[in-house]
Amino acid sequence: MYHNDFLKVAAITPKLRVANPKYNVDEMLRLLKDNPASIAVFPELGVTAYTCNDLFFQNSLLKESKREITRFLKHNPFKGIVLFGAPLEIEGILYNAAFIAKEDKLLGIVPKFYLPNTQEFYEKRWFTSAYDVVRRTKMIRYLSQVVPFGSIIFKESETNLSFGVEICEDMWAPISPGNLLALNGAQMIINLSASNEYLNKRSVRKRTVVEHSRRNAGAYIYCSAGVNESTSETVFSGHNLIAQNGETIVETEHFSRESEIIYGDIDLSKIAFVRKSHSSFRDTINKHASDCVEVEFELETSDDYTFEKPFDTLPFVPKADDKKAFEKIAALQENALIKRLNHIGSESVIIGVSGGLDSTLALLIAARAADALGMPRKQIIGVTMPALGTSEKTRKQADELMKDLGVTMKAINLKQHIKDHFDLIGHDGTTTDKAYENTQARARTMVLMNLANMHNGLVLGTGDMSEIALGFTTYSGDQMSMYNINAGIPKTLVRYMVKKYAETKFSENLDKVVKDVLDTPISPELILDQVTEEELGKYEVNDFIMHRFLRFGDDEERIQWLIGKAFGLSESESEHYVRNFFKRFYSQQFKRQASPDAPKILDISLSPRSDFRMPSDVDKRN
């Protein structure tokens, strides 16, 4: 399955019999029938089994292996690329090799370069390292085919797809063949392995695979031998791994006596994006040119794509080890604020408290920072500023929160001030246009700034990354502060952090007020009964779009397809979301250009001084 730059790969650990190529090929053919992957990988020396030992010297095993490979190619039911391992004899010398086939054609044969010969391994007894032979041999004749041989990069002729192959021990070398293949264009490295098991080896192996995928800025598919290889002192577990860009996609180690397949979805667009955007990878390419053979192939494109796992619709919200992730985010935000307060010698913190999510998080962080500094919480001045759209519900929530936290509470009713300003500028005071809304936001900011001057304090901004991306802020209003503590946190993560803070960081009983805040529809309350998501759409969808755009470099068409898959949206709904997001994103860069300092929390940021540089005058209109 291969569609829209997503590729399904399969790592297959078959049930096999040692030194029985016929049985092993039968099982390979069975497992490839109706297999949905586009690339399928079998373990090292899987045709004969890895643990044949001195039987590798016997002509009977070598002849049978070659005969069964012939049969495999003749009856191969798989339309994609299949990789399998078998011994290869060249001029009377044996090599441990990976065979790469497309239906009945061998696209290439890749020999093993690093042969383990320590502890329980003594592979050099039977096989020879390929380093010398590949210098003089680039093509070999095998089964009446002329086949590319050596270090090979396999490239799909019309797309970004490319891969290289290494075998087991090659991965463990200080500079592996796969590293060099990646630097010469291979987006994926596929490893055919027969790695035995003992205590703690799994964790070391996993770290190695995942780290190779990160350093190579690509994907790594690792397929290992299973328990049926176990013999004498060595036990095999069938530990298979598929990783991409430093993250595990899927992993298994079941010690299964039956055949086992894992599938992984490789995002080729993300690999291309990371390689373009990471300067260290680009700089390394020209320093390590390698003598690789390039082989082109064609891979059938699917009409659609079925993903192995549902998409994470809340990609910014921690899942695995979420307690540790929360503690790290909290530490980043709290220590950033502590540093800024110390640096400027601030005697107070001024926060506009609306009773909504963002200001709640900012107030909780400020309370923690004040405690760490030994600053009385009364020096945190929480200001409610009811205006023309303020609800009684949110004002009550703000008051309860400030009372529970023991901060100074200040209420300033802005209604008359705003009406006076309307008279000053000639606004009728009833037309709910942009001036009607923005007058209120700017009035609030002016009050906070002047209070900060009076109390030798710092105005703590509350706006989050999602609002910043969508430009859902008022220029010189809530867009501005003296330090914006939430700018590195998307809205979906704000919700998570507020809940976790209340549960774990405060002895005060915040449960009721925080639950009310979490249950309140998000609104700037500049107009009565205003609900943000009725205008912008669900923040979950907008955050997903931001995630795909900033982390994966996806274009609008691909994101539209993906949010349909992830959220079950119709084509027209997906198109509306994407069009609205990017219209706002590109047109509102001028606000981001003038944004205050803010701590970076995630691997992405919209700060114009660090992560995201874009001119304010981008024009994407057709």
Image (tube, grey):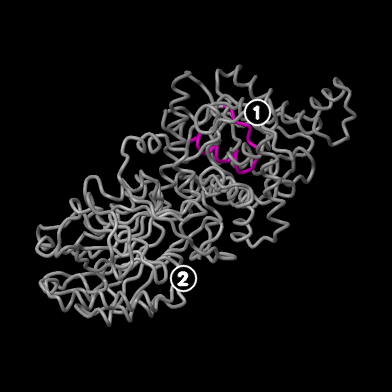
Over which residues does the magenta segment extend? Answer: 350-368
Q: Secondary structure at mark 1?
A: loop
Q: CA distance from mark 2 to mark 1?
A: 48 Å
Residue 347 vertical position relative to residue 297 in the rendered view, above or below: above
Residue 260: horizontal and vertical position, in percent? 35, 74
Residue 250 vertical position relative to residue 66 in the rendered view, above or below: above
Q: Residues within 10 Å of mark 2 (few under 14, many from 20)?
A: many
The disc at residue 616 is: 1
- Magenta stretch: includes residue 315: no
Quick one: label 2 or label 1, which is nearer the N terminus?
2
Which residue position holds label 2?
79
The answer to whether residue 549 is left or right of residue 324 is right
Q: Residues within 10 Å of mark 1 (few under 14, many from 20)?
A: some
Q: How many marks?
A: 2
- Magenta stretch: includes residue 362: yes
Residue 599: horizontal and vertical position, in percent? 49, 32
Q: Nearer the viewer, mark 2 or mark 1?
A: 2
